[in-house]
Amino acid sequence: MKQAQSLELTLGQIATLVCQLEVSAAKPGNVHRGADFEDATLIDFLNSGVVLGHAIDHDPAASVGEMILRAVQATAWVTDTNTNLGIILLLCPLVGAYRVNKSLTSAELFAVVHSISGKETELIFEAIGGAQAGGLGGSDQFDVNDPTATAHDLVAAMKFAQERDMIAKQYCNGFADVIDFVLPAIEQGQQRLGSLTPAIIYAHVKTMAQWPDSLIARKLGDQTAIASAGYAGRAIDQFEGCGQDFEPFWKAVGDLDFWLRSDHHRRNPGTTADLVTAALFVGVATDRLVPPFR
């Protein structure tokens, strides 16, 4: 049975659902139901997921750029911190592609991203600047906080940023990392660990090991991001060599969590969490991940 379709969930409801699934899992270094930050709590993330879903469903004819700006504005109404800009930037193109194709492939995502107009690019840059999250950041060629930057098309800006931002990279490769790596990691985790919540944690750690988290890199530099990937890689080595005894893996995940939190929360792997949320959306929307979710 195709659960999501039989329940007739809207795309906005699926977005809210996957945000809740992701933030509830005890991923190392991030906010979850057992760990808050001083300036961002579980409630902030849950509320952000609710208003993101509303922003997506508000106007089914809205463009990707309009959805992104509306979602950022809605988030600012429920929290005074940036909780989900990366999630918004990933989920809104996924929604746009699904509305057109009723499926989600890299080719379809690539086409949707390349169809984003100059006017939509202005709205997206306005959203990124309004979220005050660094986003694509500034450079001599592109600065999302500079109105003249909107003279450039979105894909060109994302290509310029992709080497230092995994979210920008998805705009350039048709979300291939989300579809071909992160979602299969969740599925692999489910097969071995038995349920979705530990699978989310596993996929989060495996993604960290594959790509040093770009939020950590932007805040603290490449070497710190590479170090975080090294700790994550040790946990994955334990997972792959442990047979059915997962205790060594969970101990290594605990060590990773301790290291990530030892510098207040500056080492939080936020971009990795965003990629996992996007993969959850693809999985639920296409019925590769079906309830019950425990």
Image (cartoon, rainbow, N blue to C red):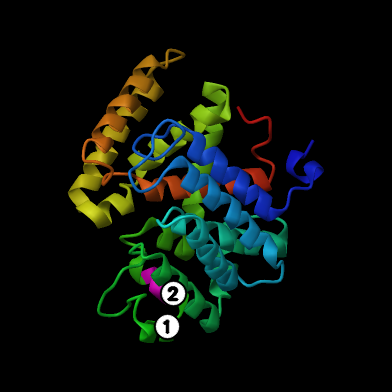
View extreme (top): residue: 245
In-image side of 243 versus 49 (left or right): left
In-image side of 17 versus 276 (left or right): right
Residue 65 image-quadrant placement: bottom right
Q: Residue at x 35, y 42 (%)?
A: 37
Visible residue check, residue 188: yes
In the image, residue 69 lies at what x, y percent?
Answer: 53, 70
Q: 10 Å neighbourhood of mark 2: few (<14), some, or many (≥20)?
A: many
Q: Which residues are magenta?
A: 155-159
Helix, strand or loop under label 1: helix
Q: Give the residue type at disc 1.
A: Thr
- Asked if residue 160 is positioned above or below residue 148 in the image, the reply reads above
Q: What residue did someone put label 1 on? A: 150
- Asked if residue 246 is positioned above or below residue 162 in the image, the reply reads above
Q: Give the residue type at disc 2.
A: Phe
Front residue of 106 and 279: 279
Q: Residue at x 75, y 38 (%)?
A: 3
Helix, strand or loop under label 2: helix
Front residue of 265 and 192: 265
Q: Residue at x 72, y 57 (%)?
A: 102
The magenta stretch spans residue 213: no
Front residue of 268 and 246: 268
Q: 10 Å neighbourhood of mark 1: few (<14), some, or many (≥20)?
A: many
- Asked if residue 38 is positioned above or below residue 86 in the image, the reply reads above
Q: Earlier in the sequence, mark 2 or mark 1?
A: 2
**Mark 2 to mark 1: distance in Å?**
7 Å
Instruction: Point out which mark residue 125 bears.
Output: 2
In the image, residue 212 lies at what x, y percent?
Answer: 30, 47
In the image, residue 145 lies at what x, y percent?
Answer: 35, 76
